[in-house]
């Protein structure tokens, strides 16, 4: 069965602190995609990153970085030097690839981690 | 940049009424989806649509729900007889390899 677990329900930090959001996933597929989305208070879903299961290289984008470890089925997200504008709910998601649908399968979502960054 | 649009942004309806939520996917995308998010909870998959038919649906997507692509540009979700528990944010997405989400329609059933 496919499952995404975000064990941290809420995290509160002070501005400029680094924060890591954990994501653990379960899948029987050998090929899959992992995602992170941000949902600010306005409610829209903002795409942050997609990672293919064959690509375990860590990625850095500005203050954001992602650590993908297949050995522990984890895809953690770190925000360096957090800012108030980072306050949002962050969702990790999984998409298995199907023979016919390729990378267009449904997304399976974690419960989300609510991050509050205080000035 | 192309984007997915959804109308209305907020819909209030009475229990038992039918509602239609509308989405305009990105024009060259071939896969379409509906997800919902009950307030404060996770996003849940409802249905995917490809080649004018449902390709996958969840247990939530029962006989009260239907989807349609009536004119080659719009993609609609119909709820035949709304219940209080249908109150949620409904997100449409389209994909040409990566799913792009619309801004959502907040449905409130009273």
Image: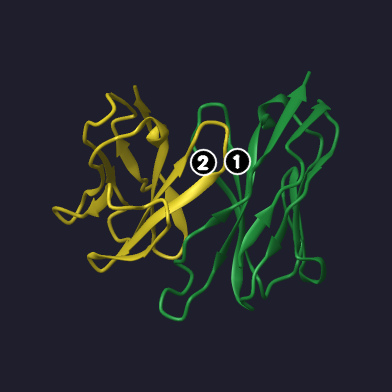
Q: Give the residue furthest to the top.
A: A119
Task: Identify the residue shown where x is 66% and y is 27%.
Answer: A85
**Residue A45, which numbered label?**
2
Q: Is residue B55 visible?
A: yes
In the foreground, B13 or A10:
B13
Task: Identify the residue shown where x is 38% and y is 30%.
Answer: B84
Q: Is residue B103 visible?
A: no
x and y percent of residue A2 in the render? Answer: 61, 65
Which chain has been coloured yellow in this picture?
Answer: B
Above or below, A45 against B93 in this view is: above
Task: Confirm or deny contact between disc 2 and disc 1 (CB under 8 A).
Answer: yes
Q: Quadrant of the C terminus of chain B?
A: top left
Mark 1 Cα shell of 10 Å, populated few (<14), some (14-19), many (≥20)? many
Chain to which the residue tagged by mark 2 belongs? A
Quadrant in which residue A57 is drawn? bottom right
x and y percent of residue B25 in the render? Answer: 31, 51
Above or below, A17 against B53 in this view is: above
Q: Earlier in the sequence, mark 2 or mark 1?
A: 1
Name the secondary structure under disc 1: strand
Which chain has been coloured green in this picture?
Answer: A
In the foreground, A75 or A4:
A4
Q: Look at mark 1 in the image and give the residue it sits on.
A: A38
x and y percent of residue A108 in the render? Answer: 55, 57
In the foreground, B83 or A34:
B83
Chain to which the residue tagged by mark 1 belongs? A
Marks 2/1: CA–CA distance? 6 Å
x and y percent of residue A83 in the render? Answer: 74, 28
In the foreground, A73 or A45:
A73
Mark 2 Cα shell of 10 Å, populated few (<14), some (14-19), many (≥20)? many
């Amino acid at each position: 069965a496919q499952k995404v677990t975000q064990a941290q329900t809420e995290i509160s930090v002070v501005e400029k602190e680094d924060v890591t959001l954990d994501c653990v996933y379960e899948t029987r597929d050998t090929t899959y995609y992992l995602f992170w989305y941000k949902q600010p208070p306005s409610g829209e879903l903002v795409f942050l990153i997609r990672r293919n299961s064959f690509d375990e290289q860590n990625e850095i984008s500005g203050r954001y970085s992602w650590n993908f470890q297949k050995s522990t089925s984890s895809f953690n997200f770190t925000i360096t030097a957090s800012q108030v504008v980072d306050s949002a709910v962050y969702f990790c998601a999984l998409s298995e690839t199907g023979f016919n649908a390729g990378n267009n399968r449904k997304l399976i979502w974690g419960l989300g981690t609510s991050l509050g960054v205080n000035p | 940049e192309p984007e997915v649009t959804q109308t209305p942004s907020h819909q209030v309806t009475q229990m038992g009424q039918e509602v239609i939520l509308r989405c305009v996917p990105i024009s060259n995308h071939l896969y379409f989806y509906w997800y919902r998010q009950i307030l404060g909870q996770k996003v849940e998959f409802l249905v995917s649509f490809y080649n004018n038919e449902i390709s996958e649906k969840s247990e939530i997507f029962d006989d009260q729900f239907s989807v349609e692509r009536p004119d080659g540009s719009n993609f609609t979700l119909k709820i035949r007889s709304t219940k209080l528990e249908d109150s949620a944010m409904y997100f449409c997405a389209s994909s040409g390899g990566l799913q792009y989400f619309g801004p959502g329609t907040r449905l409130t059933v009273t």
